[in-house]
Amino acid sequence: MSHPPDATRTDRFTIRSWMPGDGAALQPAAVSSYDHLKPFMPWADAEQSVEQSEALVRRFRGLYLTGEDFVLGIFAPDGSVLGGTGFHLREGPIACRQAEIGMWIRADVAHAGLGTAVLRELVRWGFTDWPWLRLSWKCNSTNVASRRAAEKAGFVFEGEIRGEHDAVTGGRRLGRCYSILREDWEAQPLG
C-alpha cells in the first residue's frame, strides 16, 4: 500500500483522515461529550481548546501520512464531527496486516446504532481498500455499548484480558478482546 486511502462515505456519515482545519469541528464534539467519554477515554478533557484540538488533528494527519497510525474522524453530512475512530498499529507494523480499531461517538448521537454502523463500514473498508487480514477491538468489560457494537458488527469474542492496565484510572481492569478476520467477513452474507 503506497498511500493509505483517505475516506469512505455512506449516506449517514463520512469516515476520513483528520485534516488541518478540523480542530474547530473536533473541539465542541469532544468537550460536549466529556462526561460520556471520561470513564473510558484517557484523553477526554472538559477544557480542550480549539487550538489544542487543531494541534491534535495536525498530529493525526502527520501520523497518517507517515504510516505510523491511522486516526480517523467520523463526520455528518453537514461536516460536524460525530466521533473518532481509526486503524491503530498496536499489534505490529502495517506489514503484519492487522490493526486494532478504536472508536468514540459524540454523546448526543450515541446509543442510536451509529457506532455499530461505523464499525461495520470500517470492517468493509478495511477488508476491501486496506491490506488488513485481521481487525481487533478491545474494550473495558464494563463498556456495554462497545461490547454490543463489536458483536453486532460480526466480531468474535476472543477472551477476557485480566489485570489489563486501565489508562483512565491508572489501575487495573478486566478487558475484552474481539476480532474479525478477512475470511470471516468474506463468508458473511451481505446486507
Image: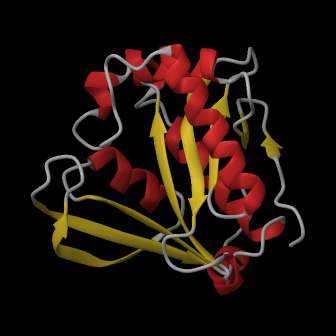
The answer to whether residue 31 is above or below residue 112 is above
For the image, the number of numbered tags is 0
Q: Quadrant of residue 188?
A: bottom right
Q: Is residue 41 left or right of residue 189?
A: left
Residue 62: percent from left, percent from top: 70, 48
Say if 137 sits above or below 91 in the image.
above
Q: Quadrant of the C terminus?
A: bottom right
Q: Is residue 15 left or right of residue 103?
A: right
The quadrant of the rendering that contains the N terminus is bottom right
Taking depth in this image into account, of 17 and 139 the one nearest to the observer is 17
Q: Is 62 placed left or right of 11 in the picture? A: left
Q: Nearer the viewer, residue 144 or 65?
A: 65
Residue 76 picture location, percent across and down: 68, 23
Residue depicted at x 77% and y 54%: 65
Q: Residue 31: which quarter of the image?
A: top left
Q: Residue 21: image x %, image y %?
A: 72, 21
Point 60% across, 25% down: residue: 54
- Render colour scheme: secondary structure
Q: Where does residue 161 sit, x and y in percent of width and height?
A: 22, 75
Classify 138 as above or below 10.
below
Find residue 159 and report its image quarter: bottom left
Of 39 and 176, which appears nearest the observer? 39
Residue 120 lies left or right of residue 95; in this view the side is: left
Q: Residue at x 62, y 78 (%)?
A: 93
